[in-house]
Image (cartoon, grey):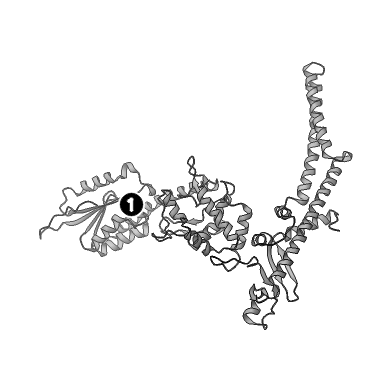
Amino acid sequence: MENKTAQPQAKEDTRLNTALYIRLSREDGDKAESLSVANQRMLLMEFMEGRNDLCLYDIYIDDGYTGTSFERPAFRRMIEEIEAGNVQCVLVKDLSRLGRNMPEVSKYTGEYFPRKRVRFIAVNDLIDKDYLDLDPDGDLMIDFKNMFNGFYPKDISKKVRSTFRSKQSNGQFIGAFASFGYVKSADDHNKLEIDPYAADIVKRIYTMYIKGVGQNTIAKILNEEGVPCPSEYKKQCGLNYHNSNRLRSTSYWTYSTIRNILKNEIYTGSMVQNKSFRHMCKKNAISLPKEKWIVVENTHEPVIDKETWDKVQNLLERNTRQTGLTGNLHMFAGYLRCGDCGRAMVKIRRKGGIYFNCGSYNRYGKKICTVHSIAEQELERIVLDDLNLMIRSVQDIERLIAEENKRESQARAGSSGDLSEYQAKISRLKKRKERAYEDYVDGLITKDEYRQYRNKYERQIDAANLIIDQVNRLQMQAYGFNPWMERLLRYRELHHLDRNMVVEMISMIYLYEDNTVKIVYNFSDELESLINTIHQQSIPVGE
């Protein structure tokens, strides 16, 4: 802000103290050559020369501030001077320098300035309006110019957003700062690379949560260990980062920070963008529904594998009580319900050990539901036995599928009984094709004869390859590759249960009044579909 140049005026001096307002922002399409601060200043000072009705009070400059918002420091200082009665005239190069937000500009030129008895002059637009000016045509001209000025930032904004959307759709990162666990690539700022230190913290958060440690507790553990939170870590790395949602002095982990990390799909290697929208005239961003997000898979190296991600999202959807710093979440927490009333079972400690009772009975008594009591050890034994039975069934299915694949291969491959016969046939046909070419080069056969032999061998090779592809495709389509089968086969036989196994395998456990236990697995539907397919193929299942 420049020093005030107004001199003490004599009583007969009726000149108006004038504020010269200058604004420049390339964000709304301003051209640096014609609208630079220096050029605006020169034009306004030339306009002031020799005038006996205006007296320079001060010059107010907002360099780098958009016209769509009126939260500009120099503009606010000018308004304060108007409120104090020190400024009676505002002088600008043109109407767009005052602003490009039509409703706000109209409010100042049509309401605020007249009410404060302030004269308003826009030199290049030939606008000179004082508080006594009641000419409707003048106001109409201001409104028209104001409307057209508003088109520029909208057009620029539209083009910028279009460019951003195109980059987002191509999986390019356009954010100012990478998510905690990643850094922008030094070679291409639109790509992400893993930050080893931060990525290890992210992995640890996911591991703790799967083991049953609550989100508040995870935050407390990290704070006690002195682990810098994401915003603090960015500052330590030299980034000029500021999170508007946090207090300036906040430098610790919180529940929301942990939850945001647990729900951020970017850690799976997918680029997730366009989650919010900021109107050019609004300060705060608006969250967009998930169907509006732009998600591109496999754009960068994942920190969290898909299996771990699925486990965590499944847990986040369940209402489980978190543990204290030294406590352990029970392995069945969030996975055990009364089969009759549907309420979650509650853990009860008795002298004989730990039991689970119906939550409705425990809270409201037997008029609502019955006790449905089961001992912890008994429930663990039932689930463990059932899981082992499931594993043995899958092992049987694996064996049966292998036998069926062999049978299908034999049926498709003919009497040879093996696809290797067709692979050998393809090798022989390729050699015959090569010999035919050699015979043609040596002059033993004509060019037409060579073409006939070549076409014949190529047709036979294509036919053999087609049979091999059909057999392989049949094997994949009939029984498919199931990740859950691979997980079950990985265990072979279970001797104990833990929280991780329950989260990975089980969807819900229901306990009924007659002590029947129903276990719904995460793969129950797929298993049923597979068994049905096997039955349709006339393969005997089990003994």
Q: Residue furthest front?
A: 351
Residue 477, position as x, y percentages in the image: 76, 49
Left or right side of 355 for 414: right
Seen at 75% across and 60% down, the residue is 388
Q: Secondary structure at mark 1?
A: helix
Q: Is residue 528 left or right of residue 91?
A: right
Res. 447 in view: yes
Is 451 situated above or below 361? above
Q: Is residue 19 above or below residue 466?
A: below
Query: Along the horizontal axis of the image, is 171 left or right of 2?
Result: right
331 vs 340, nearest the viewer = 331
Quadrant placement of the C terminus:
bottom right
The residue indicated by pointer 1 is 96
Q: Mark 1: which amino acid?
A: Ser
Closest to the observer, 279 or 385: 385
Residue located at (33% from left, 59% from top): 106
Nearest the eye: 393 or 227: 227
Task: Name the one closer to the observer, 72 or 540.
Answer: 540
Residue 394 location (% of width, % of height):
77, 56
Relative image position of residue 183 (x, y in whole percent)? 49, 47
**Exactly how many numbered labels are in the figure?**
1
